[in-house]
Image: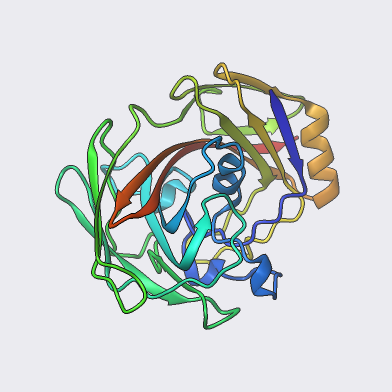
Amino acid sequence: MVKRIYKTVLVLFLLGTTSCSDALNSTTDTTAELEFMEPMTSALMSLESNEASGNGIFILNWSALNPRFLKDNENKLGLAMAIGFDEQVSFKPPYHTSTVDMGSVRIESAQGESVGLSKQSSRFSGEHTVYSHRSFGPFSNESSLSYQADAEYTISTTGSETFPALNLKATTPEKQVSIVTPSSNRMENHSGGVELSWDAVSGKPVAIHIRPSFNPKEGEKPGKFNREDSEMILLEDQNGTYTISGETLSEIADRTGAHTLHISVGQLHVNDVESGGQTYRVIMRSSDHLRVDLD
């Protein structure tokens, strides 16, 4: 089954950006409408059949969104985010409750790497606290979280008056999403449709996100990440292939005035972990990306 979501609003594009503080620029000004996940994760979460609820969400994301941000030995950037709630909530977004102080939050990879997350307060309301890589880019010394297939990662919090100390274990999927064709991550002077094929975990849905591309020059910050004119295609029964029609690309380009479009293919792997009688969700997302310069 294919579902299409038009004019997706990118509310908090926290993962895979140059700066989380720059990304916190939603047009939303009411706390009831805040989304704490970037759109692809939120869209794929909507397909989850498990109606579980709990008190915290941890997101690990591996993406090749901008190759300039990668170190020499990396092919995807590994970032993380965490939010804790002041009450039990459904794990499916959106979330209509305040987030809380979790103490210190760390992610440890199977190789023993340890990445600390920074506590940030949403600019919309002091009631909302988000943990994430605060800044990540070509001039940052922060560590990327490496990926190892079928490996156990550890997530720990020191806790606070409103959130418990945790030591959670979650296992990565057997593979990351990778676009097979087109073989290059950039198509120049392109016209017509795009025939995509990818390698991913079989039996799990895949999302394809098409939006105007941001392409900041070296040393410049990207513009706002609020893109009202984008399209999300959800493939519940994906077989590793999909053709994006030339009409779809032209419609987005005409609507936005963009000459370059950004196509992402991504997939989720969800772990629900019990601790102290409560449930916590660990979401692992991988995505691969294609830039299309239109003729």
Whether 10 is drawn above or below 265: the answer is below
Is 13 drawn above or below residue 158 in the view shown? above
Looking at the rendered image, the quarter that the N terminus falls into is top right
Front-most of residues 123 and 134: 123
Residue situated in front as seen by the camera: 144 or 45: 45
- Left or right: 14 as drawn, with respect to 102: right
Residue at (51%, 75%) from the top-left corner? Answer: 128
Image quadrant for the C terminus? top right
In this picture, is 104 found above or below 92?
below
- For the point 37% across and 75% down, the residue is 162
Residue at (79, 43) in percent of width and height = 253
Residue 221 placement (x, y as % from top left): 53, 67
Q: Splitting the image into 4 quarters, where does residue 164 fall?
A: bottom left
Residue 276 is situated, as x and y percent measured from the top left of the image, at 28, 57
Q: Quadrant of residue 262?
A: top right
For this rendering, which residue is in front, 150 or 57? 57
